[in-house]
Image (tube, helix red, strand yellow):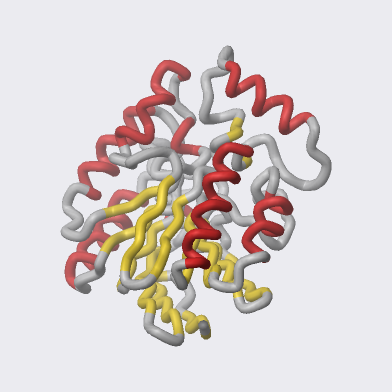
């Protein structure tokens, strides 16, 4: 498989803030789309935070993504939900997602797309039961994680475990995509990163966890599993996107712009 990778486009019609160049993201995204179209990728994965805030920011980004020839599969980022409470339920539909978390099988791989905003102070209306439950979960935490991260609910964890077990029984390799990292522990990780990490550590056929969120990017390998954080496009001076090519014994990541290229041994 050849998979295009995008992370943290985070477009907004607003002035730069710190390293974030919000308006520049449209031209960077246009470049990435042209490249993916020329390279015959099987599909593109968008790792969350298409926008910085406001529903009006979606249209110019989605108009560019409509030019993609391959299909696109998305995960939900925390900034994707910085819209009016009345608009939050629309976001997965706007991104043409089958549901907030999902999986599919391709070329011997089970590819799993998790919703790290399942429990979140961003993704649910403030007066909703889901927001209340998310607040209670966050209030019970200790450690480094911030309020603007999120967690995977018990319901989603149960679904996730069933997918992992089924893939193991069927002899499939597993790749996981989420907006948030789970290791190493930092202020960017999922609220329940430890629990999620413990779960996937039980399965030898989990090959990689891919995420965005931490714009600086990161990479580590642990017990044969590769944890890759993609550099955020919004903070890149030139650009940041990649093509991940999965072969029988390795994964090659061809970084473009400021994204690093690397080979992951399977």
Does residue 129 appear in this view? yes
In the image: residue 125, left or right of residue 36? right
Front-lying residue, 17 or 86: 86
Q: Position of residue 257 (x, y in %)?
A: 39, 70
Q: Quadrant of residue 106?
A: bottom left
Give the image location of residue 221, x and y in percent: 63, 75
Judge whether 145 appears above or below 178 on screen: above
Left or right relative to 126: residue 23:
left
Residue lying farthest to the right in this orientation: 142
Q: Nearer the viewer, residue 44 or 204?
A: 204
- What's the residue at 39%, 44% (across, down)? 50
Q: What residue appears at the point 60 percent right and 42 percent down from the top-left corner? A: 152
User: In which quadrant is the N terminus drawn?
Assistant: bottom left
Total marks placed: 0
Relative placement, left or right, of 247 versus 153 is: left
Residue lying at 28% horizontally and 53% vertically, measured from the top left: 72
Residue at image position (39%, 58%) is 6
Is 208 left, or right, of 37 in this rendering? Answer: right
As drawn, 153 above or below 69: above
């Amino acid at each position: 498989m050849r998979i295009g990778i995008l992370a943290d486009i985070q477009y907004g019609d607003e002035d730069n803030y710190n390293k974030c160049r919000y308006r520049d993201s449209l031209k960077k995204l246009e470049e990435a789309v042209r490249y993916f179209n020329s390279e015959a990728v099987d599909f593109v994965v968008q790792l969350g935070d298409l926008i910085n805030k406001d529903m009006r920011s979606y249209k110019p980004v989605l108009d560019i993504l409509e030019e993609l020839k391959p299909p696109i599969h998305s995960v939900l980022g925390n900034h994707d939900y910085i819209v009016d409470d009345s608009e939050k339920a629309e976001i997965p539909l706007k991104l043409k997602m089958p549901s907030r978390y999902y999986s599919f099988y391709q070329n011997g791989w089970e590819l799993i797309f998790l919703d790290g905003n399942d429990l979140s102070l961003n993704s649910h209306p403030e007066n909703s039961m889901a927001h209340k439950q998310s607040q209670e979960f966050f209030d019970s935490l200790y450690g480094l994680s911030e309020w603007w991260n999120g967690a995977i609910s018990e319901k989603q964890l149960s679904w996730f475990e069933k997918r992992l077990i089924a893939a193991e029984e069927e002899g499939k390799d597993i790749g996981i995509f989420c907006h948030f990292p789970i290791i190493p522990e930092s202020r960017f990780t999922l609220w329940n990163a430890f629990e999620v990490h413990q779960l996937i550590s039980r399965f030898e056929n989990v090959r990689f966890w891919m995420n965005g969120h931490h714009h600086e990017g990161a990479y580590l390998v642990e017990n044969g599993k590769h944890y890759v954080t993609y550099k955020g496009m919004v903070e890149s001076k030139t650009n940041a996107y990649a093509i991940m090519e999965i072969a029988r014994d390795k994964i090659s990541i061809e970084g473009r712009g400021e994204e690093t290229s690397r080979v992951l041994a399977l």
